[in-house]
Amino acid sequence: MIATASAPPLCNTGANNLRWDWYQATLKGSSDALTSVNAICKALVETVSGGGRWVTCKGLYGYTQGVELKGVLVGSVRVFWNAKDVHVQATSEAAESAAEVLRRVWPDHLVSRADVAFDVVDPGSFERLYGRVHSVARTSRQGGKVSTSTAGDWLDEELGRTFYAGGVSSRVRVRVYEKGHEQRAKDPGSRAPLDWTRVEWQLRPSSDQKAWLGQASKVEALGLSAFGADVAKDVVGVDVVPVGNTLRFASQDPAYWMVRQYRVVVVELLGLDPEDIRARLVDLVEQTEANNE
């Protein structure tokens, strides 16, 4: 079956219109990788739309074994593993569900790649959005001009166009493309609107940013670089702190960073009696010490 979508997922405008379109992460250091694989596969098959059964696939990214979830309506989900680590890769609409599972059940994962998509359906939206991203690429706080390139049918404008800002190996590469044209090219019977445009931030964090990205919200993730944050401000209308600044501040005031990342947990603790708060913190410290032995 050709995996296409007939329209963007229903949502509100602005930051609420952001979705994970690719989510790839590693769960490291499992004492029993096979047990972790079984638990992860069970959680994914229960969450991803259309997921039915797992079939063996070729291992990738240096992993020796792999399985792929069949029946996924739009996108793909694959799980790879070796003796210690488990690696999950989810694409397209399946990425949103996979990310939710990993963040809820295995929050300490390390993200190696994540794409955040912003959809607009409006006449002339492609010209407007790629023009704005191009302008930001020339004026970003990142320093110097961000490289740009194009692909697709820019002459006849029939088969779809793509505009890139940032290199292939950049930590943040933004692409603007005619999503409706892409969906119709995959499936001639698709009714995807031709004025459907997608702006997508492709995020490839450095080693010291992978844990941060696993905890960051979609809005925060756009700040993986100053350029990504500038595009978010111009296109989505949200202010994002570039992660480099945030991580530097975290090293100066780790308690602030802890509360910023785990505010919900801290607020719950503050609802307890002082002695109960202390007892809970002592218990957590003892647990972490045991895990480090």
Image (cartoon, rainbow, N blue to C red):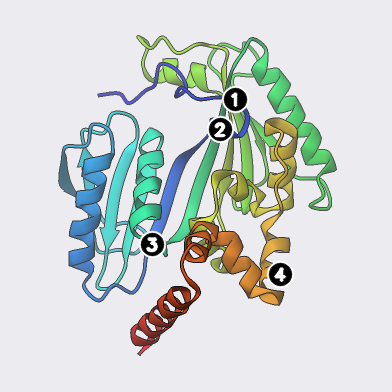
Q: Are marks 3 and 4 in contact (CB under 8 Å)?
A: no
Few, some or many C-alpha atoms within 10 Å of disc 2 (few <14, some 14-19, many ≥20)? few
Tell me the residue that label 3 is attached to.
Answer: 26
Counting from the top left corner in percent of width and height, residue 201 is at 59, 41
Tell me the residue that label 4 is attached to.
Answer: 248
Mark number displayed over residue 16: 2
Counting from the top left corner in percent of width and height, residue 69 is at 22, 42
Q: CA distance from mark 3 to mark 2?
A: 27 Å
Which label sits in the foreground, 3 or 1? 1
Amino acid on which disc 4 is placed: Arg
Tell me the residue that label 1 is attached to.
Answer: 13
Q: CA distance from mark 4 to mark 1?
A: 32 Å
From the viewer's perspective, tell me whether residue 40 is left or right of residue 256: left
Amino acid on which disc 1 is placed: Thr
Quadrant that contains the N terminus: top left
Q: Are marks 3 and 1 in contact (CB under 8 Å)?
A: no
